[in-house]
Amino acid sequence: MKFVLASYGTRGDVEPCAVIAHELVRRGHDVRIAVAPDLVGFVESVGLCAVACGPEARTWQDLHRDFLTHLFRRFWKVEDLIRLGREDWERLTQCWTEISATLMSLADGADLLLTLVIGEQCAANVAEYYGIPLATLHLHPIRPNGQSAPVVPARLMRSAMTMFEWLDWSLTKKLEGAQRQGLGLPKATAPSARRIRQGGSLEIQAYDEVCFPGLATEWAQWNGQRPFVGALTMELPTDADREVASWIAAGTPPIFFGFGSTLVKSPADTIAMISAACSQLGERALVCSAESDFSDAAESEHVKVISTMNYAAAFPACRAVVHHGGAGTTAIGLRAGIPTLILPTFLDQTIWGTQVKRLNVGTARRFSSTTEESLIADLRTILDAQYLARAREFASRMTKPADSVVAAASCIENFARSRGLV
């Protein structure tokens, strides 16, 4: 079979698609992936065929974060807000146009089109044009439900998420209308998310159902349309793994700190805060700089900074993990059975912060409001023996990585076959 994957986003967004693609290729299928230009190298490094589309994901992510920061915290700076909003919209328009053109080329003759949330509306229209099955990949609950925010009444939460779908559609209706008109499709009269649901598309939930108690029961009405497969992570080895393992073994189990594709604006200050907090608690710190430049940050005997590492290999040897709340990093930490502190900067990361608190396997605090004092207090909280016990018990209920990959690929194969195209 021929599968096309629309995987626009940063490394954390693209990796789950790459995991599925790798398994589908292993099963003998023809697979093509459309990714942001700055992710082509990563996808090709794992032996997959990638096609570039849209602006660089990191550049757009940073711009979008600045826009949201001004919108909610510096709204009085009107000129900056207008400028950032205009630039953000230009990136969205570029992304939509290029994803549409790329998918139109790749999806001709495909048996199924799989898409992430970014680009979902665009991909759905291409699938409709070609009359091929559409599958979506969700890294956390996207569709209306009453379980994503336990402090909010379920009915109110569902209503709010439904309203957001309509709001999102109202903002992008012009872009979608132009795309549909160009494809000769009828004018849409409802949000894309609603059309995807009602059209019977497969909506793969790439996280464990135990992470959101009650969600599987609430969504049982969808009759297998929203299967929970568990987190999809590659667990790739790196050149630094031996160095990391040696440093860990040379002392007490460290606390891991990482921020994924989130740029840390003051690396030296961040390292100083981490170093001081861990020194106060008598702990060691293992810091993964990833996309941030920590070269000017001072190291100390109890702090190790590394640019890249295999999280799955290192986390089981750590006391706890502190990170931005990316879906993949969160899952690897939970699977390792150690407590988590999430310091989010984006909404989806906040969702995971809320869940680790709800599940009593960790806590969370906005990264922007984190201080040395708050970090010490939060670390004391999650290092308590009861959090470790809960984390270990919770890990035993999570899906194994290999099982998640097999389940996701099988869902896609079976869905394509069930539509009678092969």
Image (cartoon, rainbow, N blue to C red):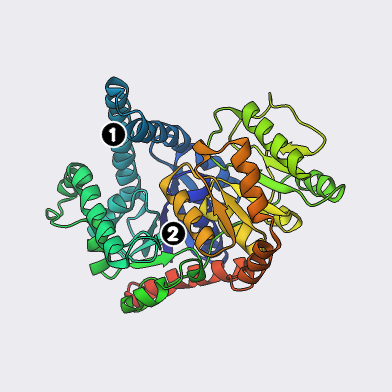
Query: What is the CA distance from the residue labelled 2 to the residue labelled 1?
Result: 25 Å
The picture places residue 161, in percent across and down from the top left corner, at 28, 57
Dot 1 amino acid type: Trp
CB-based contact (under 8 Å), mark 2 and mark 1? no
The picture places residue 263, in percent across and down from the top left corner, at 54, 34
Among the two numbered marks 2 and 1 on one chain, the one whose residue lies closer to the N terminus: 1
In the picture, the quarter occupied by the N terminus is: bottom left
Can you identify the residue that label 1 sits on? 89
The picture places residue 223, in percent across and down from the top left corner, at 34, 79
Q: Is residue 10 visible?
A: yes
Residue at 28% across, 52% down? 121
Query: Could you say which quadrant of the image residue 274 lies in?
Result: top right
Of residues 392 and 386, the one drawn nearer to the viewer in this rendering:
386
Residue at 41% across, 35% down? 65
Dot 2 amino acid type: His
Can you identify the residue that label 2 sits on? 140
Is the residue marked by circle 2 packed among few (<14), some (14-19), or many (20+) residues within 10 Å?
many
The picture places residue 185, in percent across and down from the top left corner, at 15, 54
Q: Is residue 130 visible?
A: no
Is the residue marked by circle 1 packed among few (<14), some (14-19), or many (20+) residues within 10 Å?
some
Of residues 282 and 223, the one drawn nearer to the viewer in this rendering:
282
Q: Is residue 56 above or below residue 160?
A: above
In the picture, the quarter occupied by the C terminus is: bottom left
Q: Secondary structure beneath disc 2?
A: loop
Instruction: Left or right? Give the position of 373 relative to 245.
Output: left
Of residues 157 and 276, the one drawn nearer to the viewer in this rendering:
276
